[in-house]
Image (spheres, helix red, strand yellow):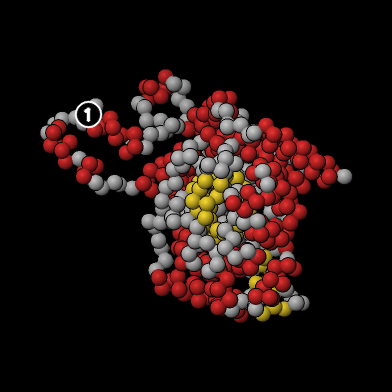
Amino acid sequence: MDIKEPIGGQLEILSRNDIERIHGATVEVLWRLGVKVWEPSAFKLFKRAGAEVNEKTKMVRISESLLKETVSRAPPEFYMYGRDPRYKLRMGANRVHFSIVGQTVRVQDLDGTVRDAKLKDAEDIAKIGDYCEHIHHVSVGTTPKDVPDEVHGLHHIWANWENSVKTTDGYNYGANLAKRTLQMLSILRGGDEEILKTPTLLGFTNPVSPMQLSADLVAGAMLYSRYNQPMLYAPEALAGGTAPVTLAGLLVQQNAEVLSGIMVSQLVRPGAPVLYGTVSAVLDMKTGAPALGGPEVGLINIATAQLARNYNLPSRGTGGNTDSKVNDLQAGYESSTTLLMAALAGMNFIYDAAGSIEGSLTMSMEKIVTDNELCGMITRILDGVEISDESLAVDEICKAGPSASHLGTTFTMRRFKTEHFMPALLDRTHRDSWSRNGEKDMPARARERAKWILKEHIPEPVDASVTADMERFLKKVTKEVAR
């Protein structure tokens, strides 16, 4: 499949010396303090690898040599596969990919109502994401309340697969759930051997700031790594709250948390695919809430992308978030600022890029559509300016001469669709035309577009035998947790 994977990495804020100082400070923290490892099997892995451990406190102290040796086993890039294995994303080499926001607790439907999500919402979100050409990844976007909470992630993954060919999240909140998602993948792929060949389920582990690796998430991460499924490690450290108030201090702590997490995956399976990530922000000192739409998020993302490249690792950032409760002007400038900075930084995988409002507590379906347009604009920016004999257009300039129009020339007709961004939602008409069409603002046009997608878009179907096996499996698992 032909997938547009823009290339970032043009924007950097840390010098070589800055990166070396952050690394040196990280090494000091991991040796002087260490990291608390709650998962017993992971704790034993560190002990066997030669880390200094305290059985009573569960603290693991890591030397620089052990850190470098273990992290160096991680691949500099890998491919992640969609439900249709022909759909694959190259994670690495400054390729930039945009994802729908994940794990929201509420949904804003297309009549504007904010409410608890249902499984039908998960299906609709995946269907919209499947249609939107600038969105690469369909996340486990929300938490359906009409299925048992213990298995909502499993039902959401299937909703994604039923309604999109694109890549999707896994669900590794504990070894038991991680095992069940792998069983689902085995049904989809036709056997366990195929699981290893096509990494498909993207696992998430958020180290608990400050300086802890949790039990359930790490247990699931270990199982995913054993089966060669990609794992991302991304703390949500808050400057002034769960991390030092300075951004430099936050980057040191975050670096220690991420690298220690990546070590777990490499100790389980050397070469297991991982992403070096961040969800970090500052703590708003007025409200006590994370400022996920703040400018500091952009700075943290740029620095994080540089640090990931320093360790030769693919990166995961966050952009597109807003603290606004609606899809308004605040949402527009917070989302565009954070998303553009993460993309220019060369983040390989940008989570929350589409659909986030209320600090990612709520999924907005109309905002998926508006953010898809924003992702398209950013993709065009990342493409830059082509300099070639043809694009310099000397013959065209001389042929047209002074006071001539280039409108309608063969050169213009051949090149304008690839040279210019062609918006689907932005209104560039004159006011009279806009008035005749109902004076609709951007959110209104996005709602209309989303409704059209849900009515008209038909995702590529899943094989009928796979559907039957998957539905039997989910029915069985759902009954088990209901006992």
Q: Which picture quadrant has residue 408? A: top left
Q: Nearer the viewer, residue 481 or 306?
A: 481
- Looking at the image, which residue is at 15% across and 38% down? 395
Q: Nearer the viewer, residue 47 or 272?
A: 272
| Secondary structure beneath label 1 | loop
Residue at 73% x, 52% y is 179
> Residue 103's x, y, as percent?
65, 47
- For the C terminus, give its image quadrant: top right
What is the quadrant of residue 206 in the picture? Answer: bottom right
Of residue 224 and residue 358, the one placed in the foreground of this image is 224
The image quarter in which residue 427 lies: top left
**Which residue is found at the position 71% from the left and 41% from the top?**
155
Q: Position of residue 247 (x, y in %)?
A: 51, 65
**Residue type (three-letter) at the residue carrying disc 1:** Thr
Please provide percent x and percent y for residue 291.
Answer: 56, 54
In the rendered image of this protein, does residue 474 appear above or below residue 179? above
Left or right: 303 in relation to 326: left
Q: Which residue appears farthest toward the top when viewing the image?
A: 436
> Dot 1, crowdedness within 10 Å: few (<14), some or many (≥20)?
few
Q: Up-down: is 191 above or below 113?
A: below
The residue labelled by disc 1 is 409
Asked whether residue 241 appears in the rendered view, the answer is no
Residue 472 visible in image: yes
Q: Residue at x 76, y 41 (%)?
A: 473
Please tell me how many numbered marks the rendered image carries. 1
**Image check: 458 left or right of 404?**
right
